[in-house]
Image: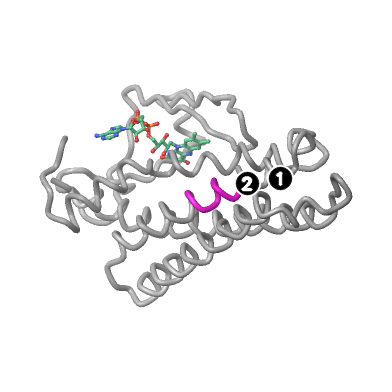
Amino acid sequence: PSDGMSVLLVDMRQAVGNGLTIRPIRTMLNHASTELFFDDLRVPVESLIGEEGQGFRYILDGMNAERILIAAECIGDAKFFIDRASAYAREREVFGRPIGQNQGVQFPIARAHVQTSAADLMVRHAADLFDDGQPCGTEANMAKMLASEASWFAADTCLQVHGGFGFAEEYDIERKFRETRLYQVAPISTNLILSHVGNHVLGLPKSF
Ligand SMILES: Cc1cc2nc3c(=O)[nH]c(=O)nc-3n(C[C@H](O)[C@H](O)[C@H](O)COP(=O)(O)OP(=O)(O)OC[C@H]3O[C@@H](n4cnc5c(N)ncnc54)[C@H](O)[C@@H]3O)c2cc1C
C-alpha cells in the first residue's frame, strides 16, 4: 500500500504564482500553519528524490523522527507545567496554609509527574532505536501518544492549580495550555496511533 508515490523537491520561489498557492491559516496558537494548493505545477524530473514510486517510505522515515521530536517537546511542556504548578502550590496560601498541602491539589501534580516520567522512558527508547537505525515506527507513535497525553494532563492540572490566575496572560499558563493541546491532533492524531497499534502490533483488522 505504500508503493507508487514519489517525492519531488519544489523551489517555492519559482513555484508560487506558477501553480502553487500558499494561504496562511490563522490559528488559536502561536504556530504558523498554511494551506497549499497545487494547480498544474510543473516540476523538473531532476527534482525527484530517491527512486520513483518509493516516496512514501522516505516520508514515513521522516515522520518517525518528527514524532520522537514532538514527543520530546511534550515532555518539556509537561515539566514546565509541573514545575509551575508545584511552585504555585507551595506559595499560594488559602485559609492559612499553602494550597499544595491539600492532597486534592497535591495528588494531580504528583500524578502528572508519574505519567511524564513513564512517557519520557518511551521517548528515550524510541530515540535510541532511531539513533541505532532500527525500525522505530511503533515506538515513535507510542512515545508521541503517551507524551502528548502526559503534557495535556499536566497542562490541565497546572491551570486548575492556578485558579483564576491560570487564565491571566502574565502567568503564561493559558498560552501554553492551548499550545500543548495541539499534539493530540498533529502531527498525527491519537486515534491514528491507536489504529497503528491495533493493526500492526496486535494484528486486528483495519477499519479503513
Ligand atoms: C498548527 C498546525 C500545524 C500543522 N503543521 C503541519 C505541517 O507542518 N505539515 C503537515 O503535513 N501537516 C501539518 N498539520 C496538519 C496535521 O498533521 C493534521 O491536522 C493532523 O494530522 C490531523 O489530520 P486532519 O486535520 O486531516 O484530520 P482528519 O483526518 O480530518 O481527522 C479529524 C478527526 O477524525 C479522526 N479520524 C479520522 N479518521 C479516523 C479513523 N479512520 N478512525 C478514527 N478516527 C479518525 C482524527 O483522529 C481526528 O480527530 C498541522 C496542523 C496544525 C493544526
Q: Are marks 2 and 1 in contact (CB under 8 Å)?
A: yes
Specify the farthest residue to the right: 96
Name above or below for residue 78 compared with residue 173: below
Q: Is mark 2 within 8 Å of ligand 1?
A: no
Q: Residue at x 54, y 54 (%)?
A: 74
CA neighbours of label 1 inside 10 A, class few (<14), some (14 to 19), many (20+) = many
Instruction: Tell whether position 150 is magenta.
Output: yes
Q: Residue at x 29, y 72 (%)?
A: 134
In this picture, residue 120 sits left or right of residue 54: right
Q: Secondary structure at mark 2?
A: helix
Specify the farthest residue to the front: 95
Q: Quadrant of ligand 1?
A: top left
What distance separates the C-alpha of mark 2 from that of mark 1?
A: 6 Å
Q: Residue at x 74, y 33 (%)?
A: 167
**Image location of residue 60, percent across then percent down:** 30, 53
Residue that label 2 marks: 157
The amino acid on which the numbered mark 1 sits, given as a three-letter code, is Val
**Image location of residue 197, percent across then percent down:** 24, 53
Residue that label 1 marks: 161
Q: Secondary structure at mark 1?
A: helix
Tell me the magenta residue range. Answer: 149-154
The amino acid on which the numbered mark 2 sits, given as a three-letter code, is Thr
**Image location of residue 138, percent across then percent down:** 29, 60
Name above or below for residue 101 compared with residue 124: above
Colour mode?
Answer: one colour
Q: Is mark 1 within 8 Å of ligand 1?
A: no
Specify the farthest residue to the bottom: 132
Which of the 4 image quadrants contains residue 9?
top left
Q: Residue at x 16, y 35 (%)?
A: 208
Figure quadrant of the N terminus: top left
CA neighbours of label 2 inside 10 A, class few (<14), some (14 to 19), many (20+) = many
